[in-house]
Amino acid sequence: MIQKAADSISSLYEVDETAWLETMAALIHEGRLDELDYPHLAEYLTDMARRDRREVKHRLAVLIAHLLKWTNQSGHRSRSWRSTIEVQREELQDLLTGVLRNHAEAVLSEAYARGVKQAVADTGLPEETFPADCPYTLDRVLSMEFTGE
């Protein structure tokens, strides 16, 4: 009976991830740890951590690209650019707690390189327009007062 329930829970992961998550949470709350779908739970948690790290890096790159555009094309500044800067900062502030803040610090130079590529593509400016190495600290990029000026 327990094996049949385990097979059913395991197949639920493939069919309805939300229902599977709710089942996992219920089993944990009830202390029925022997019934957890450990293989899928490990996979899911690993995927979540990877997704969160990828999101932080992506948002940093978008933010940096817009800061670079803001700095280097002052005549083209728009409310849309300003809005993107503010939204990315707010989203990053929500994400960057504990381990993800450490991750952001660790990938800042990679995010900067991606941001430069995006800024080059968006502006048509040569890559040499932008500093080769990231001139910003994470705190500076996230500062509401800093708009690259």
Image (spheres, rainbow, N blue to C red):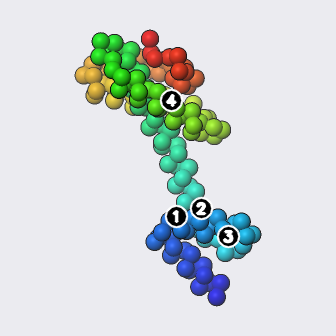
Is the residue marked by circle 1 packed among few (<14), some (14-19), or many (20+) residues within 10 Å? few
Q: Quadrant of residue 115?
A: top left
Distance from Cα at disc 2 to Cα at disc 3: 15 Å
Task: Name the spot of residue 3 as percent of width and height, x first.
Answer: 62, 84
| Amino acid type, mark 3 | Leu
Distance from Cα at disc 1 to Cα at disc 3: 14 Å
Find numbered disc 3 in the image and state the secondary structure of the residue it sits on: helix
Residue at image location 44% in from the left, 11% down from the top: 149
Q: Quadrant of residue 113?
A: top left
Q: Which residue is mark 4?
A: 89
Residue at image location 35% in from the left, 26% down from the top: 80
| Amino acid type, mark 2 | Ala
Find numbered disc 2 in the image and state the secondary structure of the residue it sits on: helix
Q: Is residue 37 above or below residue 102?
A: below
First in sequence: mark 3 vs mark 4? 3
| Amino acid type, mark 1 | Thr
Q: Which residue is mark 3?
A: 27
First in sequence: mark 4 vs mark 2? 2
Q: Residue furthest left?
A: 124
| Amino acid type, mark 4 | Arg
Question: Which label sits on residue 42?
Answer: 2
